[in-house]
Structures are given as structure tokens and as C-alpha cells.
């Protein structure tokens, strides 16, 4: 596996791939890789000629007081995992190369897609994400870029940015990868104590309850969300940041299940903030949107 740290070298490499007609797949990550990331890499490996995985803990998507300092970092382990998968390039730039002195340009996707849900609790977060992803697209020139649906709002923001800025890349949003008890895989799961980890699976049980109500014909968001909250509150020591039903691309709240919807949840377990969601097609909408 080729390890590239310099954005200039990465650009040259990508250009050479494009010149020789190779299709490039990008999986953007902040490292501390788990099965969720590796499944994205596998999708790229199966579809593209060259797979680039970037590992960069992006400071500008962390709000003041968040976990930037303690965010798990283990480059050697990440490198070994990617090597084993057969990834072609690990792109691991330094912060000073991504944001050199005087750096002052930020991409901001406006409106509910970035301001609702996590955007409300983490002001500035999605501007940091859009900025770094736009830079990664410019540096690696991917034909396809893969994102996980666990971060459904992030994916919606990126889809919007790509559309609005005419960026020539296909975005693939891949299913949530879960632990055996349903907990969505996340690098932040590392923060949970054993006891908290045991309780965390309630989030998936609650979402599944909501999904099943919808599949059985309940269309009122209020009723579904009340049940989801009730199930979450059966575990102690969990506080709810939000439980919402939203349009899956707009992130606008829905009162009734009318479009492809997400039931999206953010909770805090101890000091750890976890997000998760399930996707639901409205009756007679199957697969649209
Ligand atoms: O999902 C993540 O890990 C990050 O938000 C991303 C897309 C790599 C941007 O830093």
C-alpha cells in the first residue's frame, strides 16, 4: 500500500491514475478504523480501480469543548487494517498541510440540511465537514466517494454540496454497520465504559421499535417518536439530545410519514454522544427519493 502524506503528491498520483483511465474511489475517515470504514473500503475496492482511504482528524469539525484532543488515533493499526484489505493508498496529511497558516476559506451548506439535528447541537460542525471533504475531493479527484448512513445528515450535506458546487463525483451512501446487539459502529464507541456499552444498544432497540410501528401502518411521527423515546428512557443514565422524524435528504421535520424518512436519534451516555438512525419508506413510496 502506498502511504502518501503530501497533498501535492496525492494530487499528482490521482492525476496519473485519471490519465491512465483508472477509476478512483475515496473513503474519507478520521481513522480509528472499524468494520464500518472497512466495509466502505471494500465497496470501493469492488467498484473502482484505485481505492484511496484518507485518515485525517479534522480539527475544524470539532466545536469548542468537544473531543478533538482525546479523539482516538492509531495510525499503525489503521495502516495494517487497510493494507490487509488491499487498499491502494492511505492518504494521511498533516494538519499544517491541510490548513496552512492564513487558511481562511470555509464551505457552508445552508438551511435545514445542515442546521437541523446535529447542526443545532454542534454549530459549525457541518461547515468543518463540508470544507474538509471539498478539499479531499480536490486533492484525490475521486470518481466515487463512499459514506456511511450512520452519519445520514453528513451524507445529505455532502450530497447537497456536490450538487450545488457542481463537483464531479458520485456519492454512495452505504448501510449502517452494526455490532451483534445492534449498536451502530463508531469510533466514539471506544469512549464507553463496559457498563455504558451494555446500555448503548437500547438506541437500536428503540429505533427498531419505531421502524416496526411504521412498517405496521403507523404514519404519525408524534406517536412513533413517543415510543422511541419511551424505549430509550427504559435505560438509566441516558439523556436524549434529539429524537426526530425527518425527510431523508432535506432533514426537515415530518409530521406524517410521507416521503422517505429517517428516524434519527442523538443521545448522551455518560460523556459520550452517540447518533444513529433508521430509514423508512412511506407507504406507496417504496424506494423513491
Ligand atoms: O465521517 C467522518 O469520519 C468525517 O466527518 C469525515 C467525513 C472523514 C470528514 O472529516
Image (tube, rainbow, N blue to C red):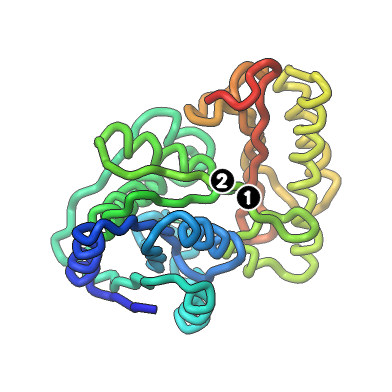
Residue tagged 2: 149
| Location of residue 7 by image quarter | bottom left
Q: Name the residue that disc number 1 marks.
A: 176
Q: Earlier in the sequence, mark 2 or mark 1?
A: 2
Q: Is residue 77 left or right of residue 277?
A: left
Q: Give the residue furthest to the bottom.
A: 76
Q: Is residue 255 above or below residue 233?
A: above
Q: Is residue 20 left or right of residue 60?
A: left
* Residue 46 percent coordinates (x, y): 50, 58
Residue at 32% across, 39% down: 162
User: Quadrant location of ligand 1?
Assistant: bottom left
Label 2 crowd (10 A; few <14 / some 14-19 / many >=20): many
x%, y% of residue 269?
A: 69, 56
| Residue 232, position as x, y percentages in the image | 78, 44
Q: Secondary structure at mark 1?
A: loop
Image quadrant where one finds the N terminus: bottom left
Q: Nearer the viewer, residue 127 or 121?
A: 127
> Is the CB of mark 1 within 8 Å of ligand 1?
no
Q: Residue furthest right?
A: 234
From where the camera sits, is residue 1 visible?
yes
> Would residue 13 appear left or right of 86 to someone viewing this image?
left
Amino acid at each position: 500500500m502506498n502511504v502518501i502524506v503530501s497533498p501535492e503528491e496525492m494530487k499528482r498520483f490521482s492525476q496519473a491514475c485519471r490519465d491512465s483511465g483508472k477509476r478512483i474511489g475515496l473513503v474519507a475517515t478520521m481513522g480509528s478504523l472499524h468494520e464500518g470504514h472497512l466495509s466502505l473500503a471494500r465497496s470501493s475496492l469492488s467498484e473502482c480501480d484505485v481505492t484511496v482511504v484518507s485518515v485525517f482528524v479534522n480539527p475544524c469539525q470539532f466545536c469548542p469543548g468537544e473531543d478533538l484532543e482525546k479523539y482516538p488515533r492509531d495510525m499503525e493499526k489503521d495502516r495494517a487494517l487497510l493494507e490487509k484489505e488491499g487498499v491502494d493508498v492511505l492518504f494521511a496529511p498533516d494538519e499544517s498541510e491541510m490548513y496552512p497558516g492564513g487558511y481562511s476559506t470555509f464551505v457552508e451548506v445552508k438551511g435545514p440540511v445542515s442546521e437541523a439535528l446535529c447542526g443545532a447541537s454542534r454549530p459549525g460542525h457541518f461547515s468543518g465537514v463540508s470544507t474538509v471533504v471539498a478539499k479531499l475531493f480536490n486533492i484525490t479527484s475521486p470518481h466515487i466517494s463512499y459514506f456511511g448512513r450512520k452519519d445520514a445528515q453528513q451524507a445529505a450535506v455532502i450530497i447537497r454540496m456536490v450538487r450545488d458546487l457542481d463537483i464531479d463525483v458520485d456519492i454512495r451512501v452505504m448501510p449502517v454497520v452494526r455490532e451483534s446487539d445492534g449498536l451502530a459502529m463508531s469510533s466514539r464507541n471506544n469512549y464507553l465504559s463496559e457498563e455504558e456499552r451494555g446500555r448503548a444498544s437500547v438506541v437500536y432497540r428503540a429505533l427498531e421499535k419505531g421502524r416496526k410501528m411504521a412498517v405496521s401502518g403507523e404514519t404519525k411521527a408524534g406517536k412513533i417518536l413517543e415510543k422511541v423515546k419511551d424505549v430509550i428512557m427504559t435505560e438509566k443514565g441516558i439523556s436524549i439530545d434529539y429524537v426526530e422524524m425527518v425527510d431523508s435528504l432535506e432533514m426537515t421535520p415530518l409530521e406524517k410519514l410521507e416521503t422517505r424518512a429517517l428516524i434519527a436519534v442523538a443521545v448522551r451516555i455518560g460523556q459520550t454522544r452517540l447518533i444513529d438512525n433508521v430509514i423508512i419508506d412511506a407507504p406507496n413510496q417504496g424506494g423513491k427519493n
